[in-house]
Amino acid sequence: MAQLAALLVSLLTLVLSISGVISTTFTIINKCEYTVWPGILSNAGVPAMSTTGFALQKGESKTITAPASWGGRFWGRTHCSQDSTGKFSCVTGDCGSGKVECSGNGGAVPATLAEFTLDGAGGFDFFDVSLVDGYNLPMRVVPRGGTGQNCTTIGCVADLNDSCPSKLQVTSVDAGGNVACKSACEAFGQPEYCCSGAYGSPNTCKPSTYSQIFKGACPQAYSYAYDDKTSTFTCASADYTISFCPIPTTSQKASQGTTQATPASTTTTSPSIGTMIYEGPLDESGASPSTRAHVFGFDSTVGVVSIAVAIWRFWHLF
C-alpha cells in the first residue's frame, strides 16, 4: 500500500508540474550592508512578472511566482534616490523608468545579471550569471529541489569593484568610490571586445585580458559573449534563490544623504501560461516562442482536477 500511495502521489505531482499548476518561484534576498532595488525584465513574447522592481532593505527578502515557461533577467540597482519632483533613479543598474518599477525597461550597464529560461529544451530550466554587461554587485543563484547533472549553485561572489582595472571603473563621489566595473565592450566599443563584425563568432572572438580578469574572479559566470561552455547551467523542477552580496562586503557603502523610495507592493498575481525555448544565452529580444501543447490532449486545469478526483476515489477503495 505504501508503494502504491507513493506512486499515486508521484503521478499527481508530475501532472501538476507538466500542466503548469506547480510554478517556479524566485526568492530574492538582500544580504548587502545597504539597500538594493532589484529589477526584473521579461523576455519578449512571454508574460511579465507580477512586479518589475522593488526595494529590499538589508536582510529583507521577497518571493515571486513566475509565469509558466518564463524567461528573463534579474539585476540589482544600487545607490538609488528620489529627487524633489519624485523621480526615482539609481547610480548603477538604473532602468530609466523614473519609478521603482522598471515597467519593461532593462537596466543600464554595467550590472551583474541573473538570466533564466524556464521549461526550455528537454524540459530543463537554463540559467546563468552574466558579467557580459559588466558588474555592479556580488550575486549568487541557488537552485532548490531541482535535478540534473548541471543543477548547481552558481554566481559571482567576488568584489570586482575593488579589483576592477582603472580603465573599466565606474566611480561616484556621492556613493563613496568605485560602484561598478564596465565590460571591455562597454568601455572601448571595439569589435574584438564586443564579439561583433569580423569577430562575431566563437572562432574569431576569444577571451580578452579584461574578460579573463572577470573569469578568474568568477569562474562560473559569463565573462564574454561566447563563454557558453563553462557558464550555462540547467535544472529540472527547481525553485531558485537569488542573493545579493551572499558573502558580506563593506567595500560598497550605502548611499549617504539620499531619500529611499518606498518599496513596491509585495502582492503577486496568479501565474499565466507563457512560452519560451532556449536558443543560447539570453539577450534583450529573448528566444523564439513555441506553442505549448495541452497535456495528454486535454485542458490542463480540467485534466489535473480529473486525475486528482480519480486518485482520491481509487485510494478510498482500499
Image (cartoon, rainbow, N blue to C red):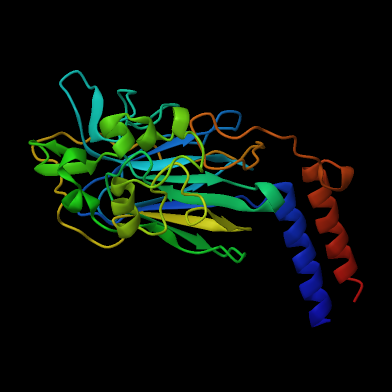
Q: Is residue 242 left or right of residue 79?
A: right
Observer-nearest residue: 2 or 298? 298
Residue in the image at 21% along x and 40% along y: 168
Q: Is residue 170 left or right of residue 305?
A: left
Observer-nearest residue: 296 or 285? 285
Q: In this view, does 315 lie to the left or right of 40?
A: right
Observer-nearest residue: 166 or 43? 166
Q: Position of residue 27 (x, y in %)?
A: 44, 53
Please state, as top left, top right, bottom left or bottom right, where the N terminus lies in the image: bottom right
Q: In this view, does 41 lie to the left or right of 184?
A: right
Observer-nearest residue: 72 or 88? 72
The image shows residue 46, relative to residue 29, as above or below, that is: above
Residue in the image at 72% along x and 61% along y: 13
Q: Position of residue 89 (x, y in %)?
A: 24, 28
Please state, as top left, top right, bottom left or bottom right, where the C terminus lies in the image: bottom right
> Can residue 85 be seen from the camera position used here?
yes
Residue in the image at 79% along x and 81% along y: 2
- The extreme top residue here reads 85
Q: Position of residue 304 (x, y in %)?
A: 79, 51
Q: Position of residue 153 (x, y in %)?
A: 46, 63
